[in-house]
Image: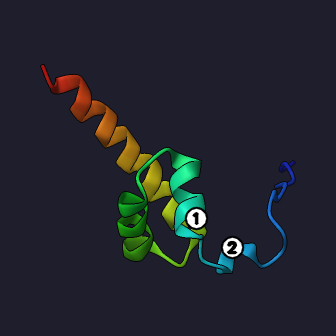
Amino acid sequence: MTKARVASLAPGAENEPYDTAAFARKYGMSEKSAEVVLSANGPSRTACDAAARSFMEAVARRSKKQP
């Protein structure tokens, strides 16, 4: 038995690119960082979301290494 996947976005939203400012707010990053992530991984929201999580984890790891 498989679990049903619940979509939190409107149908077809996956194919629409993110707004840079909204994406930056969603992940707590600068608009410049959001612009880079979106241009490198768009227009797929799934790919952009995964890249943003990875980017923010890398930023957090790097800041822990700084004295």
| Front-lying residue, 49 or 20 | 20
Measure the C-alpha gap from mark 2 to mark 1.
Answer: 7 Å
Q: Which residue is mark 1?
A: 46
Residue at the spot x=82%, y=59% of the render?
Answer: 7
Seen in the picture, residue 2 relative to 42 is either above or below; the reply is: above
- Residue 14: mark in rendering: 2
Count residues near mark 1 (Cα–Cα under 10 Å), then give few for <14, some for 14-19, many for 20+. few
Q: Are marks 2 and 1 in contact (CB under 8 Å)?
A: yes
**To which quarter of the image does residue 19 belong?**
bottom right
Query: Which residue is outermost to the left?
Result: 67
Seen in the picture, residue 9 relative to 30 is either above or below; the reply is: below
Q: Secondary structure at mark 2?
A: helix
Q: Secondary structure at mark 1?
A: helix
Look at label 2 and name its amino acid: Glu
- Residue 25: mark in rendering: none
Residue 20 position within the rendered picture, expressed as x and y whole percent measured from the top left: 52, 67
